[in-house]
Image (tube, rainbow, N blue to C red):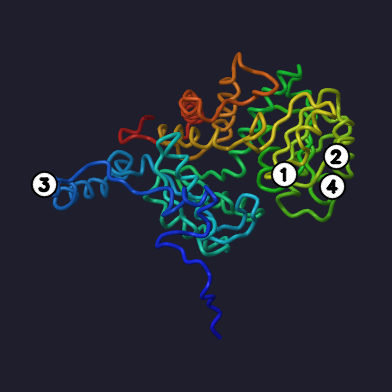
Amino acid sequence: MDTHDPYAPTLPVGASPYDDDPAFPLHRRGKIEVMPTVRVRDNGGLALAYTPGVGRVSAALAKDPSLGYEYTWKGNSILIVTDGTAVLGLGDVGPLAALPVMEGKSLLFKEFANVDCVPICLDTTDVDEIVDTVARIAPAYGGVNLEDISAPRCFEIEQRLRERLDIPVFHDDQHGTAVVVTAALRSAAALTGRGFPDLRVVVSGAGAAGVAIADMLLAAGVGDIAVTDRGGVVSRERSDLNGVKAGLALRTNRTGISGSLAEALRGADVFIGVSGGTVDQDTIAGMAPDPIVFALANPVPEVHPDVAQAAGAAVIATGRSDFPNQINNVLAFPGIFRGALDARATQITEGMKLAAATALADLVGSELAVDRIVPDPFDPRLVPAVSAAVAAAAVADRVIRQDRSGTDE
């Protein structure tokens, strides 16, 4: 059956029906490319860049693999790995549809921190296959950034790769979010005259971001954290928790509260939303005086900033760029990997993440205000400050490589 419409308008060669949307032309043929760092213009250069000169370099690396950080791109390149199961607010869209996001991540790494990236979109959701695949191609890279992999598999994948590889493995949906939230909360607490030990925080969402935020805030010294999921407060009394949430229940909810998110928020100082859903004005009004509200769901925050303000919120943040105080991972991941690569770190420790959060908060400095609790992503001081703090923390935590003489670099 011929369904061709002879009267349908034809598009010129190279045109797309999506070109009216300005995002599509920008993505045409992708957003990244591979460029040489040296030029070969004669036979002498060819003999050095390829055979026979390259053979001498390869022979040296075979004897001393640590030279790979100096004489290959390993020291400045990372893998960005996804299976496309938790992409932005779209969910499980598969590996091909995830590629524009991974290209975007690669672009940001290069633009902000001069880190070279290769996006790898895997056509499998099997944990064993993902771990094995990444481990087998990892020798050419100085780090691994895991991206948009659904929970709870993301926790196991990261842990197993960290155990198997001697390079940093970092799941940005977890730790990048946690770093920026911790920095923003440090600023917001200062504005409202609160200290971390005195805060009562409620995190809505026990997925990748929620778990990491809770753990990092605990490490930063927050006194009381409760995490909620669709079943209410994550607590030891619940029998419906998976292994990750059961472990979380042991580390959080110090006061043993139970019930719904609305019940947990009564009298709380801080709301951090990373799960979607809706929190109404009355619930925010029932929090402690001058509450801090981070409604980070995209594209629709759990609480609209206008609603939060009407309910008495003193400091408000979202995940959107059209409101003040955007909690955006781009504030963290370029500098974190820049610092880890510069230090030739073997992992990214809790101390390195906390150092990044502190550097972010300190960068706001005298500009601290209710509508400025985190720095601007385009602040030229951002990546240098975060990377220096992360590199110093790597040295302090003794996770940097040994040089050939056996002493710390």
Q: What element carries label 2?
A: loop
- The 10 Å Cα crowd at callout 1, few under 14, some 14 to 19, many 20 or more, is some
Task: Choose the circle earlier in sequence order: 2 or 1.
Answer: 2
Quadrant into which the C terminus falls:
top left
Q: Label 4 belongs to which residue?
A: 232
Task: Choose the circle earlier in sequence order: 4 or 1.
Answer: 4
Q: Write the residue at 76% across / 19% down.
A: 192
CA–CA distance in space, label 2 to label 1: 13 Å
Cβ–Cβ under 8 Å for marks 2 and 3: no
- The 10 Å Cα crowd at callout 3, few under 14, some 14 to 19, many 20 or more, is few
User: Residue 319 versus residue 55: which sits nearer the camera?
Assistant: 319
Q: Label 1 belongs to which residue?
A: 300
Residue 308's x, y, as percent?
80, 32
Residue 284: numbered disc: none
Q: Nearer the viewer, mark 3 or mark 1?
A: 1
Residue type, mark 3 in image: Asp
Residue type, mark 4 in image: Gly
Quadrant into which the N terminus falls:
bottom right
CA–CA distance in space, label 3 to label 1: 57 Å
User: Residue 401 versus residue 198: which sits nearer the camera?
Assistant: 198
CA–CA distance in space, label 2 to label 4: 16 Å
Q: Write the residue at 81% across / 34% down.
A: 307
Task: Name the image quarter holding residue 126.
Answer: bottom right
Residue 280: numbered disc: 2
Cβ–Cβ under 8 Å for marks 3 and 1: no
Residue type, mark 2 in image: Asp
Q: What element carries label 4?
A: strand
Seen as rendered, the residue at the extreme top is 366
Left or right side of 68 for 285: right
Task: Choose the circle earlier in sequence order: 3 or 1.
Answer: 3
Question: From the viewer's perspective, is residue 2 above or below residue 223?
Answer: below
